[in-house]
Amino acid sequence: WLVFTGCYRADSYGGCDLYISYRTASGWSAAANLGAAVNSDQWESQPCLSPDKQELYFASRRTGGYGGSDLYICKLQDNGKWSAPVNLGPSVNTPADEQCPFIHADNQTLYFTSSYWPGYGDDDLFYVRKQADGNWSQPTNLGYPINTIDREGTLFITADGKTALYAAERKDSYGLLDLYSFELKEKNRPYPTRWVQGKVTDKKTGKGIAATLELTDLSTRQVISKVKTDSSGNYLLTLPTGRDYAFTVNQKGYLFNSDQYFLKNGISDSAAQKNIVLQPIEKNAAIVLKNIFFETNRFELSPASVTELDKLVSLLQENPTIKIEIGGHTDNVGKAADNLTLSDHRAKAVVDYLLTKKIDPARLSAKGYGMTQPVADNNTTEGRALNRRTEMKITGL
C-alpha cells in the first residue's frame, strides 16, 4: 500500500488530499482519493500507515482542531473503508503546528514535529507512546543536537529502532531541507520489536486462506495489532517486546487458532517463522485453548484468560447451532484421582464463564480427563506444560 498527498487534483476536496495506491503483480494501481470521510475542504498531508495497515496518521488544518496543523488518526473498518478522522487530542496537539507523524514498527511509539511544545527553536522533533488505556503519553523532546534553533522536519526510524533519518534546515545545509542521519539515544528508541511471518492454510486442503490475525496484550486486553493476510494466506506481524501476548487467527467457517508470546522480559531483535493451520468447523474438530490460565493446583480462571474466553464466546455467537465440550487435562504430577478432579473443575470453570455470557447451557458440556490423554512426554518440563491444557471440541452442529 502507498498512501500519499496529492494537491490540486481534479477530484480533490481541498488544496491537498490523501490518496492510496495498491501494489499489484502488474505494478501500482491508479491512485484513488480516500474520499470525504477522510479528506476535508482544507489541507491534509504527511500520511503514515501503521505497520498492520489498520491505522492512518496524518496532519490536517481542518476546522475543529486545537489550532494550526493537528495530527489525526483514521482506522480501517471491517468493510474496508476508513473511519472518520479522530484528533489525537491535547496531549499531542496544540494551538500551533504539529506535523510529520511517523508511527514506528512497534505500533506504540509516534514521532512528530511541533512548533509549540518546549524545544530549542523552530519545529522540533518529539515522540509520544501509546499507553494501556489507548491515550498518549506526554511528548518528549529528542533533545540537542538533534533539535536545534533551526527547523527539524520529517523523521524515519529503521525497524531495529537504532538509526533515524530526518529532514532539517540547518546552517550546514546545501539547500533548504537536507537529509541527515543519527543514532537514536537508548531512552528515545521505540520498543524492541520481533517479527513473525508465515502462512495460514486450511487443514483439510492445505491451501492458503485469507484470515485475520490479532495480537492482544494479556494483562490489559488491549489489541496491539490486527493484520489481514493476503489472499494466499501470507502474513507479516510485528511484536513489540515488554508485554505478554495472545496471538489469535480467525476466519469465518473455521475454528480460531490461538498461541502466545511471552515477551514481558524482553527479547533481542529477531524474526520467527510460524505457519498456522485452521480447522473447518465440523463435528469432532478440536483446538487447544492456549491462553486459558490457572494457578498451580487451582481451578479459578486467571484474569489473563479473558481474551481467549471472549474469542470462544464470539465463536459460539457467530455459530449459534454448534455444541461443544470443554475438556480439562493435566500432567502426571500428583495422584491420578486428584488430577481428574482438578481437570474437571477447570473445564467447568470455562463453561461457567460461557454461561455468564448467555450461551445456552444445552450447547455446553465439561469433562475432566486428568492425566489420561497426554500429548507430550511427561518426563520433560516442556512436555508436562503441553499436557496441562484446556481443549474445546465440537460435539454437534
Image (cartoon, grey):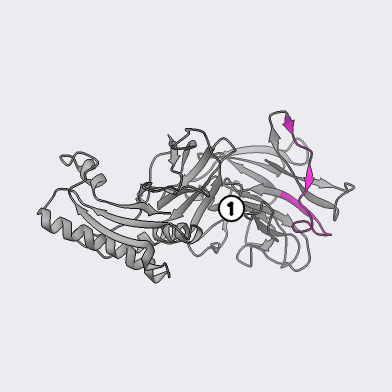
Q: Kindly tell me whether residue 122 is visible in this rendering.
A: no
Q: Kindly tell me whether residue 97 is visible in this rendering.
A: yes
Residue 360: x and y in percent read 41, 68
The secondary structure making up most of the magenta span is loop
Secondary element at tag 1: strand
Residue 5: x and y in percent read 77, 46
Farthest top residue? Answer: 26
- Residue at left offset 82%, top offset 59%: 42
Residue 109: x and y in percent read 54, 52
Q: Which residues are magenta?
A: 27-46
Residue under numbered circle 1 = 110
Q: Nearer the viewer, residue 249 or 392?
A: 392
Question: In the drawing, does residue 93 fall left or right of residue 344?
Answer: right
Q: Residues within 10 Å of mark 1 (few under 14, many from 20)?
A: many
Q: How many marks on residues?
A: 1
- Residue at left offset 35%, top offset 64%: 303
Q: Nearer the viewer, residue 114 or 42?
A: 42
